[in-house]
């Protein structure tokens, strides 16, 4: 390995200090009910890479041991992980704020019909992505992943979350 330290230039840029960790983001795996061509992790229904049960337990224990207030869960579609609900429940039991990065279409996949009420009950914050509003930019995605269907699922969430504070961020 080459010595590089002597190549660094002196600068008056202020010293950078690390602050405490506020958010723990975990990627539960690459399995997804969609297979968008723009996906930066190339997620899809045929991907099998998923976080092991042991690592899920490690995440739960780590949250408990550290003063980290936010658990941010992503994927793939993180809801497809068999331990997704265990993880959410454990984090909420520890009074941690939980963010679910949800593609919305998962809410109506077979076996996930009660997902919206589960998220609402546990007061999970949803960060939802919508497909592009321009049809020409949506064509590479599966037909179920269109803006009308996503809006319908948003309606479902809002309906489910009556009387519960529901924070939904939309990214385009
Ligand atoms: S919904 Fe999200 S995670 Fe799933 S394939 Fe599309 S971009 Fe990737």
Image (spheres, rainbow, N blue to C red):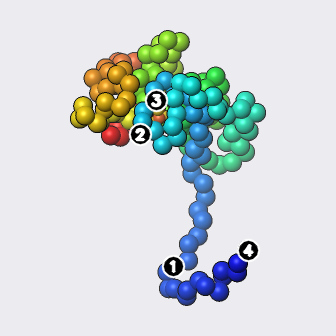
Residue 147, relative to residue 99: is it above or below?
A: above
Tell me the crowding category of disc 2: few under 14, some 14 to 19, or many 20 or more residues within 10 angstroms, Cα based. few
Residue at 43% across, 30% down? 103
Secondary structure category for the residue under label 3: loop
Callout 4 touching callout 2 (CB < 8 Å): no
Tell me the crowding category of disc 1: few under 14, some 14 to 19, or many 20 or more residues within 10 angstroms, Cα based. few
Res. 125 mark: none
Residue at 46% across, 29% down? 35
What is the spatial separation of the Cα atoms under label 1 and label 3, in whole angstroms?
43 Å
Secondary structure category for the residue under label 4: loop
Residue at 71% across, 32% down? 52
Ligand 1 within 8 Å, label 3 CB: yes
Residue 35, relative to residue 110: is it above or below?
A: below
Ligand 1 within 8 Å, label 2 CB: yes
Res. 1 mark: 4
Tell me the quarter of the picture where residue 26 sits. Answer: top right
Q: Earlier in the sequence, mark 1 or mark 3?
A: 1
User: Viewer-proximal residue, 69 or 35?
Assistant: 35
What is the spatial separation of the Cα atoms under label 3 and label 4, in whole angstroms?
41 Å
- Quadrant holding the C terminus: top left
Res. 38 mark: 2
Secondary structure category for the residue under label 1: loop
Residue at 52% across, 85% down? 11
Residue 151 position within the rendered picture, expressed as x and y whole percent measured from the top left: 30, 25
Residue 98 position within the rendered picture, expressed as x and y whole percent measured from the top left: 54, 36
Res. 35 mark: 3
Secondary structure category for the residue under label 2: loop
Tell me the quarter of the picture where residue 166 sits. Answer: top left
Residue 63, relative to residue 19: is it above or below?
A: above
Res. 14 mark: 1
What is the spatial separation of the Cα atoms under label 2 and label 3, in whole angstroms?
9 Å
């Amino acid at each position: 390995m080459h010595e590089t330290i002597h190549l660094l230039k002196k600068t008056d840029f202020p010293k950078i200090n690390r602050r405490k960790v506020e958010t723990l983001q975990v990627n539960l795996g690459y399995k997804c009910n969609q297979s968008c061509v723009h996906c930066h992790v190339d997620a899809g229904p045929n991907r099998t890479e998923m976080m092991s049960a042991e690592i899920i337990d490690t995440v739960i224990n780590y949250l408990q041991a550290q003063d980290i207030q936010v658990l941010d869960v992503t994927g793939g579609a993180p809801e497809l992980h068999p331990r997704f609900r265990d993880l959410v429940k454990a984090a909420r039991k520890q009074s941690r704020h939980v963010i679910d990065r949800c593609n919305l279409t998962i809410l109506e996949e077979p076996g996930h019909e009660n997902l919206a009420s589960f998220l609402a009950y546990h007061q999970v914050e949803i960060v939802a992505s919508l497909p592009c509003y321009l049809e020409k930019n949506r064509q590479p995605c599966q037909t179920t992943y269109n803006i009308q269907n996503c809006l319908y699922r948003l309606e479902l969430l809002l309906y489910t979350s009556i009387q519960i504070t529901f924070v939904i961020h939309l990214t385009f």
